[in-house]
Image (cartoon, rainbow, N blue to C red):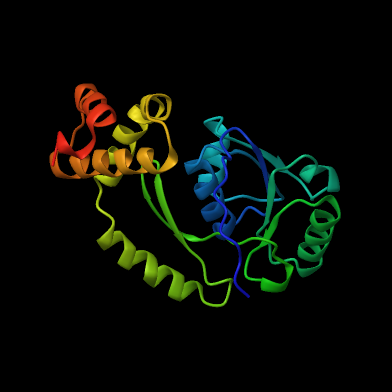
Amino acid sequence: MAYFPLFIDIAGQFCAVVGGGRVAEGKIRQLLEFGADVAVTACTVTSQIALWQEEGRIAVHLREYRPADIAGALLVVAATDDVSLQRQVAAQCREQKIPVNVVDVRELCTFYFPAIVRREDVVAAVSTGGSSPALAAKLRRELECVIPETCGQAAAIMGAHREYVLTHVAGAEKRKQVFEQMLEIVLREGRLSGEQVRNLCAHGADVYP
């Protein structure tokens, strides 16, 4: 079954991870890359997870899992070989309407970690609905070749001028045209000045054909 793609802001948001092995480490790394506030519950953890705790980047509870460990979480990851615990965590998440990913157990998941290509704020993600992570990884590698490193910078430049266009150009269709013209300049020249934006807003494509 295809899953609906949804990009959300997890920066500073509590995300719970149950398990402390290599698989859990990989999921934690992804969450940290997007600024999540991660808490891990496990009897033992990898050296990298322990290091993240020492650095103050995550919280670690070295003990058995307790239901309260996921209370208030934005999302939960269960990365453990304990089948009974996996099912317990998944059931509790469903009861509390918390999205849960149970690693390698498709039927217990309500969300998946996609294969990600990131260029600063530009993020492309691929999911196969849990059917084939290998295929998702292959498509990610292909996307890495297609999406240039400069996309992140281009998005930042466009974002810096977005509010001006929204407040100075009337009509959705006209604003769309101005944004498209701005993007052409950014991709062609690698920059965009405030004067160029003001001219485009006032006169359109006739200024910068």
Q: Position of residue 119 (x, y in %)?
A: 34, 46
In the rendered image, the quadrant that contains the N terminus is bottom right
Please count the marks in the image.
0
Q: Position of residue 59 (x, y in %)?
A: 65, 36
- Compared to residue 53, the image places residue 122 above or below, namely below
Q: Position of residue 175 (x, y in %)?
A: 37, 38
- Identify which residue is drawn at 38% across, 70% down: 139
Where, by quadrant of the figure, is residue 3 drawn?
A: bottom right
Where, by quadrant of the figure, is residue 62 drawn?
A: top right
- Compared to residue 187, the image places residue 204 above or below, namely above
Q: From the viewer's side, name the closer residue of 49 and 182.
A: 182
Q: From the viewer's side, name the closer residue of 143 and 43.
A: 143
- Compared to residue 132, the image places residue 181 above or below, namely above
- Identify which residue is drawn at 13% across, 42% down: 209
Where, by quadrant of the figure, is residue 79 drawn?
A: bottom right
- Identify which residue is drawn at 50% across, 46% down: 48
- Identify which residue is drawn at 51% across, 61% down: 114
Q: From the viewer's side, name the closer residue of 193 and 28.
A: 193
Please give left or right for residue 6 compared with residue 40 in the image: left
Please give left or right for residue 26 compared with residue 203 in the image: right
Q: From the viewer's side, name the closer residue of 9 and 180.
A: 180
